[in-house]
């Protein structure tokens, strides 16, 4: 059975092997960035790195969302309300983005301040987004980004609200449920489980230490329709540790 094979550590840059282990390294190397959220960077050898968004720290002292609440069912149009400190705005507004389960943007717009925004105090905001519910998987994320006219990454900030799409058809209980590592008909194969492909692939059994890192990667279809590895932050850290002296 034919298959597209993605190998680890393919030679780049005139024969020298460049070990890219993170979204930042991929971006700095000049590889293409996808227009989805979080952003993804893809290397020529099929590796995909996802940008890490810091949403762990409490942002309630910067922005508070009244509606929708986390994991609330939403329909189009959705009205978003809450309050944010003046520093979250620029010219009385800030960006709002709605993405599906795969990070693809399905709606975007701006939240408008409902009062004077040039203050350090909280200012109410309101936004309305019109969207078409995804046909597949009923969950997504609402992202409220701090407006950053400077474009400098150190000034970026955002809060993410998980939401459910009421109008997305419910999946049948009889449908195949994808595993955490294999998605979209792709499978982990090869002697050491180092290959992500459409079907079984015969490889040599030479073992490399970085193969263990890929146990935390996702084998799924990439933007070009081929099966390939989507690398998580955990994989990047693992590869970084292996490459450290």
Image (cartoon, rainbow, N blue to C red):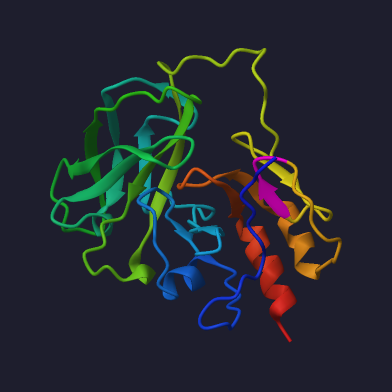
- Residue 11 is situated, as x and y percent measured from the top left of the image, at 60, 75
Q: Is residue 164 above or below residue 120?
A: above
Residue positioned most to the bottom:
245
**Image point (22%, 36%), residue name:** 126
Is residue 17 visible in the rendered image? The answer is yes
Q: Is residue 87 above or below residue 185?
A: below
169 sits to left or right of 229: left
**Image point (23%, 69%), residue name:** 150
Is residue 181 visible in the rendered image? The answer is no
Instruction: Pick the residue in front: 123 or 46.
Output: 46
Question: Which range of residues does the magenta coloring cover?
Answer: 195-199
Q: Is residue 146 above or below residue 3?
A: below
- Residue 164 is situated, as x and y percent measured from the top left of the image, at 46, 25
Q: Is residue 117 magenta?
A: no
**Image point (60%, 43%), residue name:** 220
Q: Main secondary structure of the magenta part?
A: strand
214 sits to left or right of 109: right
Instruction: Pick the residue in front: 107 or 215.
Output: 215
């Amino acid at each position: 059975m034919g298959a597209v094979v993605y190998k680890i550590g393919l030679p780049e840059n005139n024969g020298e092997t460049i070990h890219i282990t993170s979204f930042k390294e991929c971006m700095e190397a000049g590889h293409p960035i996808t227009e989805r959220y979080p952003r993804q960077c893809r290397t020529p050898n099929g590796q995909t790195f996802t940008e890490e968004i810091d949403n762990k720290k409490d942002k309630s002292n910067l922005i508070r969302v009244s509606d929708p609440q986390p994991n609330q069912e939403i329909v189009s149009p959705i009205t978003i309300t809450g309050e944010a400190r003046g520093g979250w705005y620029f010219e009385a507004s800030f960006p709002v983005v709605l993405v599906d389960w795969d990070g693809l943007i399905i709606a975007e717009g701006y939240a408008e301040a409902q009062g004077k925004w040039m203050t350090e105090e909280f200012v109410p905001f309101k936004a309305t987004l019109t969207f078409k519910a995804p046909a597949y998987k009923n969950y997504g994320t609402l992202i409220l980004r701090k407006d950053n006219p400077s474009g400098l990454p150190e000034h970026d900030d955002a809060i993410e609200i998980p939401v459910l799409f009421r109008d997305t058809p419910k999946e049948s209980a009889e449908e195949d449920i994808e595993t955490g590592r294999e998605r979209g008909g792709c499978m982990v194969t090869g002697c050491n489980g180092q290959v992500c492909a459409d079907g079984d692939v015969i490889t040599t059994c030479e073992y490399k230490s970085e193969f263990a890192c890929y146990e935390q990667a996702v084998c799924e279809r990439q933007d070009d329709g081929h099966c390939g590895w989507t690398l998580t932050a955990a994989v990047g850290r693992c590869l970084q540790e292996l490459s450290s002296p």
